[in-house]
Image: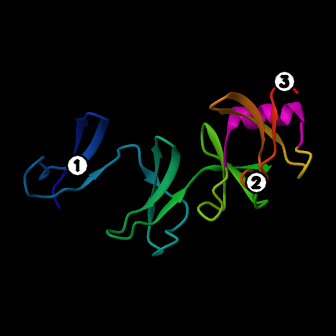
């Protein structure tokens, strides 16, 4: 029930309890000053959530102690996952399947855009061929890897 103080840490400003001190017993409450209330309740416990900006984009976390409820606020795209046909979410530098962790498809956004622009399809499964890097240099590989293991030289 003590007042909150705005402090400066190595990763930037943060709010903390005035009873907080490093390496000493006391209140350990701290919060991000840029946090704002989330629109939806926690999917785990139904409690209130706050939205924060993390290093991998925006996300919401539950305010209830010990709940651990978390919702990724990534933007859903019009693209479909080549493995399970669910929507791909924009996660910053890459696109990931919305069915994660069941489906672990990830693709670099630049490589995906380049593959769609070229319009080259895998002759086995008709999914896009993505430029990849291997120990012997660049090659084109099927987006549905490991289900489809088709590869081609970049020069083709």
Residue 140: percent from the left, percent from the top?
78, 35
Residue 58: percent from the left, percent from the top?
52, 47
Q: Is residue 104 left or right of residue 127?
A: left
Nearer-N-terminus badge (1/3): 1
Give residue 138's quadrant in the image.
top right
Instruction: Look at mark 3 in the image and give the residue it sits on.
Output: 155
Instruction: Look at mark 1 in the image and give the residue it sits on.
Output: 16
Q: Residue at x 10, y 58 (%)?
A: 26
Mark 2–mark 3 CB contact (< 8 Å): no
Q: Residue at x 84, y 37 (%)?
A: 116
Of residues 115 and 145, the one drawn nearer to the viewer in this rendering: 145
**Majority SS type along the magenta span:** helix
For the C terminus, give its image quadrant.
top right
The disc at residue 81 is 2
Of residues 147 and 58, the one drawn nearer to the viewer in this rendering: 147
Of residues 141 and 117, the one drawn nearer to the viewer in this rendering: 141
Asked whether 33 falls inside the magenta stretch, the response is no
Q: CA distance from mark 1 to mark 3?
A: 57 Å
Q: Nearer the viewer's eye, disc 1 or disc 3?
A: 3
Residue 29: percent from the left, percent from the top?
23, 56
Residue 87: percent from the left, percent from the top?
74, 56
Q: Residues within 10 Å of mark 3 (few under 14, many from 20)?
A: few
């Amino acid at each position: 029930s003590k007042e909150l103080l705005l402090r400066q840490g190595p990763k930037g400003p943060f709010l903390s309890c005035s009873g907080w001190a490093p390496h000493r017993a006391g209140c350990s409450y701290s919060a991000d000053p840029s946090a704002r209330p989330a629109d939806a309740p926690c999917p785990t416990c139904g409690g209130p959530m706050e939205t924060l900006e993390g290093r991998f984009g925006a996300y919401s976390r539950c305010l209830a102690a010990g709940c651990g409820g978390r919702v990724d606020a990534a933007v859903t795209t019009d693209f479909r996952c080549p493995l399970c046909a669910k929507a791909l979410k924009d996660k910053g530098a890459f696109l990931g399947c919305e069915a994660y962790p069941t489906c672990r498809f990830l693709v670099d956004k630049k490589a995906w855009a380049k593959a769609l622009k070229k319009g080259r399809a895998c002759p086995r499964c008709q999914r896009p061929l993505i430029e990849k890097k291997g120990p012997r240099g660049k090659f084109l590989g099927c987006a549905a890897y490991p289900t489809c293991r088709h590869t081609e030289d970049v020069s083709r």
